[in-house]
């Protein structure tokens, strides 16, 4: 038999007092799509980084086609054919697609100058094999998340990667975009590549992957073909117990009153040049959970920033409990009871190089609250792991970083909560906890607006769902509406 594409043998990695990976072993083969799953903090991303040379193991070794990875660096890994696609895109927004594709691996002609024609030929050859069509001249800032994800994959293929490691590749994609990405990955596997995907979406594993490896607390607890096991098996392995029943959406209050109201809102795109939000009006009454569905890049980010006060409205107004807050500062809106979670926790949710403790109380300093008690309560209530307030936020897993952001937003007196991608990159148990926190916020009388790329999530937790396309409200639908109707509306076609 040929050597496995990638072998991880008895790997361990410690960060201070935290043992992130403990004696973990796994084998990945060419021609297969492998899934790596587990709770937040289970060690999935760390194991992937060890495989790709981005982290160095304290014990154990990584073998590529039977030969140890030495030195264990990203440069050596890519030289040996292992490419890493990170959860947060490593692209330069101001550069074109072509410039991003060849960045760091630029083909040069005479006198050391960039050979753009060669770079274009390399990119087009890879895109042709994958049946992809990207505008090589477009600025990355103008592209959607699905296109950016494909740029990351094409870039490492240009460098000769045969083993492709992807950390939460569908966390920012709509269901349709995720299906398209998996179709691309399947073509790569069928052509002989080895694909390893970290994901929390177990239905994606069932639909697309050949093999699944489950991590719990840094250890491999299940390693099996997907055809020989069930989603229930994986869930039990992930949690170490039978999963709890789903939380129940609170009843919609009657009569409805107060809350958040947008009146004829028009907001310019963050990269200027056009209106991202066009004449949007809707109301989210207190005690109600309203969702916003739509393909990402259709004005969601600008809408959230305008409500938060981070971006001015070109026209229209934002109202909270009958008061116009359009001219208020961010701090004044927060003091009035507005809580906002943005879609990019790294850019607009966390200070990555300060402590978890400081991140948990950002905005609360000077309010008279007991900082130590507040931090301890938020760590415990949201199950943040490790429960060490002194470590840097950067050293938490993505899901635990999200818990920090959610805890800070909702663990206080809230009149209106605007939550963009509240469970992005979190596991089943953590998502359940965040949903319960959202329900409790609504039960306490707050108006809750949830913007999510996960339509299944919106249908599970919202009383009604507003669909937007190209910055405009297309329709408002009850959550039990058929998925194909939502899909039609997300493409800009009003539901019948």
Image (cartoon, rainbow, N blue to C red):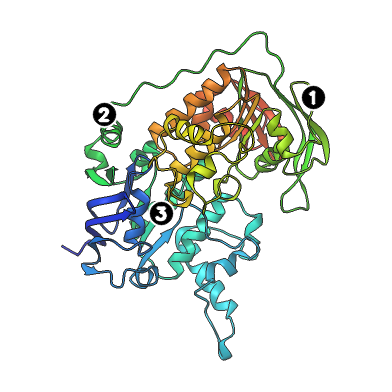
Mark 3, secondary structure of its residue: strand
**Quadrant housing residue 143:** bottom right
Mark 1 falls on what kind of element? strand
Residue 336: % across, % down: 71, 28
What residue appears at the point 51 percent right and 32 percent down from the top-left corner?
374
**Residue 13 visible in image:** yes
Does 316 appear above or below 183? above
In the rendered image, which quarter contains the N terminus? bottom left
Q: Name the residue under label 1.
A: 323
Task: Tell me the residue that label 3 is attached to.
Answer: 166
Asked whether, in this view, residue 244 is left or right of residue 104, the answer is left
Q: Earlier in the sequence, mark 1 or mark 2?
A: 2
| Disc 2: which residue | 241
Residue 283 place in picture, x, y as percent: 71, 23
Dot 2 falls on a residue whose secondary structure is loop
Nearest the eye: 97 or 434: 434
Distance between mark 3 and mark 1 Cα atoms: 46 Å
- Taking the view exactly as shown, the residue that stands out farthest to the top is 254
């Amino acid at each position: 038999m040929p050597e496995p594409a990638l072998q991880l043998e008895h790997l361990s990695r410690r960060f201070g007092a935290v043992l992130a990976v403990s004696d973990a072993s796994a084998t990945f083969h060419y021609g297969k799509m492998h899934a790596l799953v587990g709770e937040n903090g289970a060690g999935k991303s760390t194991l992937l980084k060890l495989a790709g040379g981005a982290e160095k193991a304290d014990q154990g070794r990584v073998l590529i086609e039977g030969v140890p990875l030495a030195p264990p660096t990203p440069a050596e890994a890519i030289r040996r054919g292992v490419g890493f696609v990170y959860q947060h895109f490593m692209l330069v927004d101001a550069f074109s697609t072509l410039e991003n594709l060849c960045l760091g691996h630029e083909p040069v002609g005479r006198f050391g100058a960039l050979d753009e024609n060669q770079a274009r030929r390399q990119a087009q050859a890879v895109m042709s094999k994958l049946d992809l069509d990207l505008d090589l001249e477009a600025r990355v800032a103008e592209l959607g998340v699905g296109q950016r994800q494909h740029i990351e994959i094409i870039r490492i293929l240009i460098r000769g990667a045969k083993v492709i490691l992807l950390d939460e590749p569908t966390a920012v994609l709509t269901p349709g975009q995720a299906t398209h990405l998996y179709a691309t990955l399947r073509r790569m596997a069928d052509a002989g590549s080895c694909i390893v995907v970290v994901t929390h979406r177990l239905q994606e594993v069932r639909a697309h992957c050949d093999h699944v490896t489950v991590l719990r607390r840094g250890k491999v607890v299940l390693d099996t073909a997907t055809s020989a096991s069930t989603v229930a098996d994986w869930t039990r392995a992930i949690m170490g117990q039978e999963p709890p029943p789903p939380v129940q959406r609170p009843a919609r209050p009657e009569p409805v009153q107060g809350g958040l109201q947008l009146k004829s809102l028009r907001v310019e795109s963050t990269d200027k040049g056009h209106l991202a939000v066009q004449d949007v009006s809707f109301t989210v009454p207190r005690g109600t959970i309203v969702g916003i569905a739509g393909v990402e890049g259709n004005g969601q980010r600008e809408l959230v920033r305008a409500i938060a006060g981070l971006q001015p409205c070109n026209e229209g107004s934002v109202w909270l409990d009958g008061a116009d807050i359009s001219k208020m500062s961010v701090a004044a809106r927060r003091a009035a009871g507005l809580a906002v979670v943005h879609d990019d926790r790294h850019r607009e949710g966390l200070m990555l190089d300060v402590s978890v403790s400081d991140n948990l109380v950002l905005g609360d300093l000077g309010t008279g609250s007991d900082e130590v008690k507040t931090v301890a309560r938020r760590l415990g209530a949201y199950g943040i792991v490790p429960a060490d307030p002194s470590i840097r936020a950067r050293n938490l897993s993505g899901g635990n970083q999200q818990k920090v952001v959610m805890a800070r937003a909702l663990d206080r007196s809230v009149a209106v909560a605007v939550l963009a991608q509240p469970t992005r990159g979190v596991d089943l148990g953590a998502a359940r906890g965040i949903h319960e926190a959202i329900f409790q916020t609504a039960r306490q009388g707050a108006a809750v607006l949830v913007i999510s790329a996960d339509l299944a999530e919106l249908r599970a937790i919202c009383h009604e769902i507003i669909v937007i396309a190209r910055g405009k409200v297309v329709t408002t639908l009850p959550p039990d509406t058929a998925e194909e109707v939502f899909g039609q509306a997300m493409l800009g076609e009003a539901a019948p």
